[in-house]
Amino acid sequence: MLMELPLQIGAIILATVLAIILLIIIIAILAYSIRIVPEYQRIVKLRLGKFKGIYGPGIVFIIPVIDRPITIDLRVLSIDLSSQRALTKDNVEVTVDAAVYMRVIDASKAVLSVTDYRSATVTLGAAVLRDVIGMVDLDTLLTQREEVAKKIASIIDEHVSPWGVKVTAVAIKDIKLPDTLVRAMAAQAEAERMRRAKVILAQADYEASQMYLKAAETYAKNAISLSLRQLDTLLEVAKEHNLILVVPSSLEVTSLSALAASVFKRSQEGSGASTQ
């Protein structure tokens, strides 16, 4: 009896250990078998290598060893294209940084049609970017960047649609030009600004000359207006530094006095008439 007791205790301990191990295995199998798929994901299930279907969102059951689940994200992905060097239509070398925005619209095609749809889209996008840049000149690339990006996105989307992928947009983030070209463009812009300034100055001179011509015609028809103009000029000059003025012979003091008296008389007559 005393010898059977240790054997029974050992058997109980062994059974307990085996039960714990079995429980751990069952928990691990259940943890692997039960998947909770969020709204923005889908699971493509392959059973014994064959396509079984697309599952989710919600709870999805996976049979260990038999089923192979592949998770696909349906949200929009932003993929940066590495800096691409290309020649424009007018043989100018530029370096372009761009990004491709894409999303999966058919999870089964994204798994069964292409090995890695992300890397394949990046490779294709870089090639299309260089091709499209080669079809436009530098001015078009700089001034119509959005239109060029739309054209690149359209071409990429046409090629990746059999993979169950939709390219929503392409963004051209930066266009780098050679330093020599940048300096040349800066000099051209400076020359253009100088040309506009000279044109504006010449236009102002022309308009001023036309006004002077009209004033000369007025002075030629009316000697009193010319004398008033001369007197006004002398008064403006006399205000500065108490200068001694030498009156031209054409501007006699008597005529100025008579002119002033005439103006004063007219002002008095005008005030008298207004009083009556």
Image (spheres, rainbow, N blue to C red):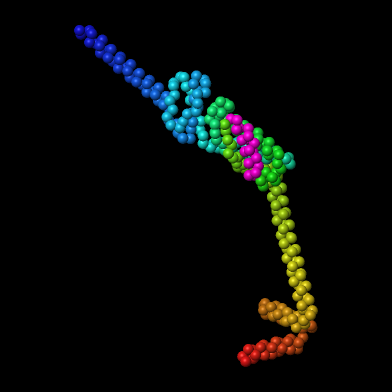
Q: Please say whether residue 111 is visible from this viewpoint.
A: yes
Q: Residue furthest left?
A: 1
Question: Above or below — where is 63 with respect to 145?
Answer: above
The answer to whether residue 92 is seen in the rendering is no
Identify which residue is drawn at 58% across, 35% down: 166
At 39% from the left and 24% from the top, the residue drawn is: 30
Give left or right: position of 89 versus 78: right
The answer to if 151 sits in the magenta stretch is yes
User: What is the x, y in percent for residue 11?
Assistant: 28, 12
Position above or below: 9 against 41 = above
* Quadrant in which the N terminus appears: top left
Q: Position of residue 78 (x, y in %)?
A: 55, 37
Segment tinted magenta in the rendering: 145-163
Task: Locate residue 246: give its quadrant.
Answer: bottom right
Left or right: 228 as drawn, with respect to 79 = right
> Taken as a whole, is the magenta stretch helix, strand or loop?
helix
Query: Where does the image place residue 245, in percent across and percent down from the top left?
Result: 73, 81
Instruction: Give coordinates of residue 50: x percent, y percent.
Output: 52, 21
Is residue 27 or residue 36 the one in the foreground?
36
Towards the viewer: 210 or 92: 210
Quarter of the image with the C terminus is bottom right
- Residue at point 50% right, 28% down? 54
Q: Observer-nearest residue: 208 or 76?
A: 76
Q: Is residue 230 found left or right of 106 in the rendered image?
A: right
